[in-house]
Image (spheres, grey):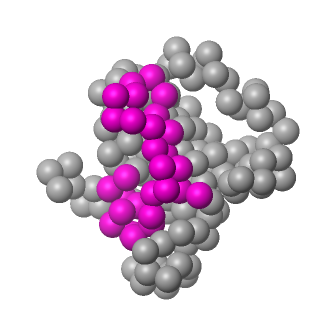
Amino acid sequence: MTTKDDQKNTDDAAPLDSDRLARLVASLLLSRKAEDVVILKMDEVLPLTDYFVIATGGNSRHVRALKDVVERGLKGRKILQLNRTPKEAKSWVLLDYGDFVVHLFQPEAREFYDLENLWGDAETVPLTDLPDVPPDDYDPMA
């Protein structure tokens, strides 16, 4: 996990490791009606990252809203984003946080790129024990 404050998160009692962060992202996405949310454990098949979090938005506006909820939700927890696709990207948005990477797709792009099949050797993490995201956790006007 990469944070702005010496790799620590002072908001929660327990440190936010990559597993907890991937689950937090899944919870944030589900709170904004993302479809087909999947977490892939990548550390055994791709040494560059621990997790992929993959989700679908119904259209470009929905994908942008999903991107916004992830970015704001993690920025509020002082989780540093390393890279992302350009703002013009509409069918596939990638948010790189180092220990985990978020892939947000429109349905056609998700079907075309089929990351779950491409990385079929990766373990799919069950969407259990997801953290609750308070309704005020994301302020669209912020």
Q: Residue at x 28, y 56 (%)?
A: 138
Front residue of this view, candidates 69 and 85: 85
Q: Position of residue 127 (x, y in %)?
A: 62, 49
Numbered range of the magenta stretch: 71-98
Front residue of this view, candidates 115 and 26: 115
64 sits left or right of 35 in the view: left
Up-down relation of residue 26 to residue 8 (above or below): above
46 sits left or right of 2 in the view: right
Residue 59 in view of the camera: yes
4 sits left or right of 122 in the view: left
98 sits left or right of 50 in the view: left
Front residue of this view, candidates 4 and 61: 4
Q: Position of residue 112 (x, y in %)?
A: 62, 16
Residue 40, quarter of picture: top right
Q: Position of residue 82 (x, y in %)?
A: 49, 56
Q: Residue at x 53, y 50 (%)?
A: 96
